[in-house]
Amino acid sequence: MSRSKRILSRLLCTALVVAGAASLAGQSAYVTNAASNNVSVVDTATNTVVATIPVGTFPQGVGVTPDGSKVYVANQTSNTVSVIATASNTVLATIPVAGGPIGIAVSPGGSSVYVTSVSSSTVSVISTASNTVVATIPVAATPIGLALTPDGTKVYVVGITGTVQVIATATNTVTASIPGFGQGQGIAVTPDGTKVYVVNLSGNTVLVISVASNTVIATIPVGTGPVGVAVNPDGSKVYVTNEVSSNVSVISSATNTVISTIPVGTGPIGLAVMPDGSKVYVANRGAGSVSVINTATNTVTATVAVGANPTAFGVFIRPPAATQSVPTLSEWAMLLLALSLGGLAVQALRRTSTI
């Protein structure tokens, strides 16, 4: 290969690498630190903390809008929800809600945010357009976790009293109650909307609900003190944090059995799967850290120090920039660099073709 062609090849490869990096830019994990009263922003490309955002007191639950533009944080003891603008990583609004907010879930369309309030036994519905509470729904006592079906028509809510309730989003009313979940904590719906995985802390199990019948179809033993649960994008695996045994159980959704157990930091609580399914981020409350799991090997590949008592209870990873309507300045810079390198490659190609 001639020297000019080698230079051309390198320019094209560099442009492709930069363009690829630009397409993944903006993927960040927003980790609530309950004892620090702030949120650590972890860059998932470098696994480093790039910002720390003060919020209300004792932040717990967190949810990201589908377009990645906003993050909603439930502040349990200040009875508020902080709204973070991801473009600037600053709080743009603070919304008063019912007492003891813990869990947060954003609707698939991004128009509504649902918040469990453990002290008042309600679910608050926030409009993301106005950042105000538009409805308050009474539910069973001490609600903790909640999750929406992919079509946005139902919210599944579970609490310490062990009853799962189903809310119809069209009417904001409870339409079904399913007992028998012990001390309910985390809850997640599969991407195809057919199953709901519910953590039972007191039973050291995960129960599986059929959405079609609203009945329990499986009970899965996991580690000790399970709290958080998340499903990967293709629905094939379910990840569960076990706070007492300090590990993560990996469940095959095809067989509803544990296929791997991964040691993480002390006292894991919340966890979230990357949109491409390649990594799982785990908030370790006891260790003040985040463990990064490689899903191909089921091993921890990085540990990130964050604030005190991180919980990150919810879906806390910002989607890729490619799905967002307004790129950030850094994302524009990377795209411009890719275009410049591509232009240099084209110019080099023209020069070599005339030699």
Image (cartoon, helix red, strand yellow):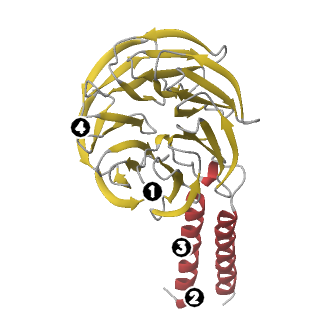
The residue identified by callout 1 is 307
Pointer 3 or 1: first along the chain: 3
Q: Which label's residue is closer to the chain start, 2 or 4? A: 2
Crowdedness of circle 2 by 10 Å Cα count: few (<14), some, many (20+)?
few
Real-space Cα separation, disc 3 to disc 1, in angstroms: 38 Å
Q: Amino acid at mark 1?
A: Gly
Spatial CA span between label 2 and label 1? 51 Å
Between residue 88 and residue 91, name the one nearer to us: 91
Who comes first in sequence, dot 1 or dot 4?
4
Rate crowding at label 4 as few (under 14), some (14 to 19) or many (20 or more) other CA atoms within 10 Å: few
Cβ–Cβ under 8 Å for marks 3 and 2:
no
| Residue 256: image location, x then y, percent | 28, 27
Q: Is residue 16 above or below residue 3?
A: above
CB atoms at circles 3 and 4 under 8 Å apart?
no
Q: Residue at x 50, y 43 (%)?
A: 58
Mark 2 or mark 1: which is in front? 1
Residue annotated with mark 4: 259
The location of residue 104, given as percent across then percent down, is 54, 34
Question: Mark 1–mark 4 contact, CB under 8 Å?
Answer: no
Q: Answer yes or no: do the residues labelled 2 and 1 have beta carbons within 8 Å? A: no
Label 4 SS: strand
Of the residues shown, which amino acid type is indicated by label 4?
Ile
In the rendered structure, which amino acid carries the disc numbered 3? Answer: Cys
Q: Residue 4 has which mark?
A: 2
Q: Nearer the viewer, mark 3 or mark 2?
A: 3
Query: In the visual, does 250 lie left or right of 35?
Result: left
- Mark 3 highlights which residue? 13
Residue 351 image point, x, y percent: 68, 86
